[in-house]
Image (cartoon, helix red, strand yellow):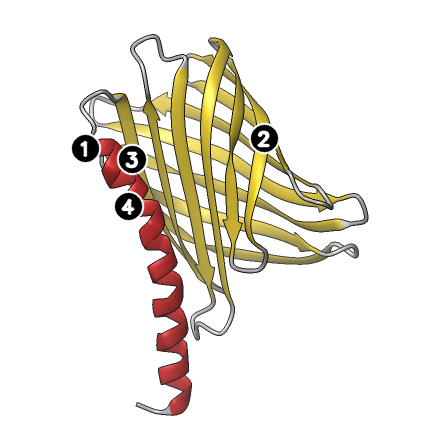
Amino acid sequence: MNAGCASATDKLCKYMKKLMGFFVIVLFLISQKQIFGQSLSLELNGMDRYWSANGSFSANLNKSKKLSFSAVNKFVTDYSVEKVKLLVLSNAAYAVTKNFKTTVGAMYSNSSGIKPTVGIQGTIVRGGFMAMCFPNFTIVKQPEMMFISMIQYIKRLNEKSQFVTRMQSLGMVNSREHLFSTFRFRSGLIRGKCQFGLASDLNFAGSNFDFNKSLGLFFQYQLF
């Protein structure tokens, strides 16, 4: 194995070890008998510029569903594993109303480390339509705001298949500049616990909003 391959492998292993923290938390919560209602999904994306893996876990912590926990991770790298991005969000939430929550938690990224966060989350569900917005603030000397949103529509086609289309956005700014923002578009089919179809990402970076786009395919599996 040449030096370049060895370096790329070492870098990949380094970040995969960090992802293990996310799965340790998830496995611990799954094992607890007092957890009421859980959801775990994994998504793989093969784009023309990079590939990514996303995981999402949520659980209600009491019967009234007032208290809940969620963890989301996003791992992105180019095909040479030269540029690696890792983002992990973990939050405990309290439901003020059915569609409105307050949250406290932490955010980890390989570029800035661990930061405590607070936020609010609003959700609207109407039939096959769902919309969610989640402004989140880091509690640090120079605060940052992360804004997460999603719009999704699901239409039943027949007894075994459904059509799904959604747009997800993730952006971060501080008091001085725009750091990054991403808009992810997914359209495809749902069959059983699987989703698959076409993927498109629009990415903006820095104060100049440097732009790049990427096309590809996605596959998502709902474990439970």
Q: Mark 2 packing: few (<14 Cα in 10 Å), some, or many (20+)?
A: some
Q: Earlier in the sequence, mark 3 or mark 2?
A: 3
Residue at 40% over, 63% down: 15
CB-based contact (under 8 Å), mark 2 and mark 1: no
Residue topped by disc 3: 40
CB-based contact (under 8 Å), mark 4 and mark 3: no
**Whole-Å distance between the Cαs marked 4 and 2?**
23 Å
Coordinates of residue 219 in the picture (x, y in percent):
32, 47
> Which circle marks residue 24 in the picture?
4
Coordinates of residue 7 in the picture (x, y in percent):
41, 81
Q: Nearer the viewer, residue 105 or 125?
A: 105
Query: What residue type is disc 1 on?
Result: Ser
**Whole-Å distance between the Cαs marked 4 and 1?**
11 Å
Q: Earlier in the sequence, mark 2 or mark 1?
A: 1
Residue at 31% over, 53% down: 20
**In this rendering, would 137 be left or right of 26?**
right
Query: What residue type is disc 3 on?
Result: Leu
Q: Secondary structure at mark 2?
A: strand
Query: What residue type is disc 4 on?
Result: Val
Residue at 22% over, 20% down: 34
Q: Name above or below for residue 164 compared with residue 66.
A: below
> Which circle marks residue 31 in the picture?
1
**Whole-Å distance between the Cαs marked 3 and 2?**
23 Å
Residue topped by disc 2: 118
Q: Earlier in the sequence, mark 4 or mark 2?
A: 4
